[in-house]
Amino acid sequence: LSLSLSLSLSLSLSLSLSLSLSLSLSSLSLSLSLFSLSLSLSLSLSLSLSLSLSLSLSLSLSLSLSLSLSLSLLLSLSLSLSLFFFSLSLSLSLSLSLSLSLSLSLSLSLSDEQQKDYLLERRDLAIDFIFSLVLIEVLKQIPLHPLMDGLIQEVINLAFKHFKYKEGYLGPNTGNMHMVADLYAEVVGVVAQSR
């Protein structure tokens, strides 16, 4: 009886040991699965963070690329416009020098003072010509805001005054004056169209 009792006690002890061992194994397995789950969650979180970081980096890169592209486009437009005005001023100066040499040969009878006034007037006309062409091109390209009506009216008034003065001029530079007057009329027309 004592042997059977000791055997049953050892059996119950071994059962309790195996039960505690299985419980510790199951708790270890549970803690391992929780650890692997938290590890996979943190890994997926870090992957999603790196993906969002790379997406935001590529977005900022595309924005900066678009900005640099628009800046280079604006620079090339500015360069072509300045080249156009340079060639225009060069052809204008060549035309003026040719007409100046022709007019100088025709106006030998004019006095030196009249000739100086005549040359200064031609220079002023060349400047007016280039200025009015640039003003026309600028006014065609920029949108005029309705709140700028005072400024627009001032441009119209000044251009109209120049037009009236140059249209009524009679003198040695009459043809050139009328051409510049027509350009000032064109300025008024461009401003009126953009309104």
Image (spheres, helix red, strand yellow):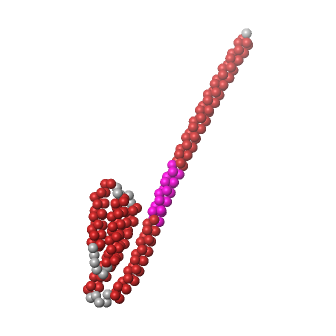
Total residue callouts: 0
Q: Magenta residues?
A: 56-76
Query: Majority secondary structure of the magenta segment?
Result: helix
Give the residue at x 51% y 54%: 62
Q: Quadrant of residue 35?
A: top right
Horizontal and vertical percent for residue 74?
45, 62
Is the residue 79 above or below the residue 116 in the image? above
Q: Is residue 106 above or below residue 14?
A: below
On-image quarter of the C terminus: bottom left
Side of 69 relative to 187 (left or right): right
Q: Is residue 129 found left or right of 55 in the rendered image?
A: left
Check residue 150 for magenta coloring: no
Q: Quadrant of residue 134?
A: bottom left
- Measured as percent of width and height from the top left, residue 166 is found at 29, 73
Q: Residue at x 28, y 75 (%)?
A: 169
Asked whether residue 127 is in view, the answer is: no
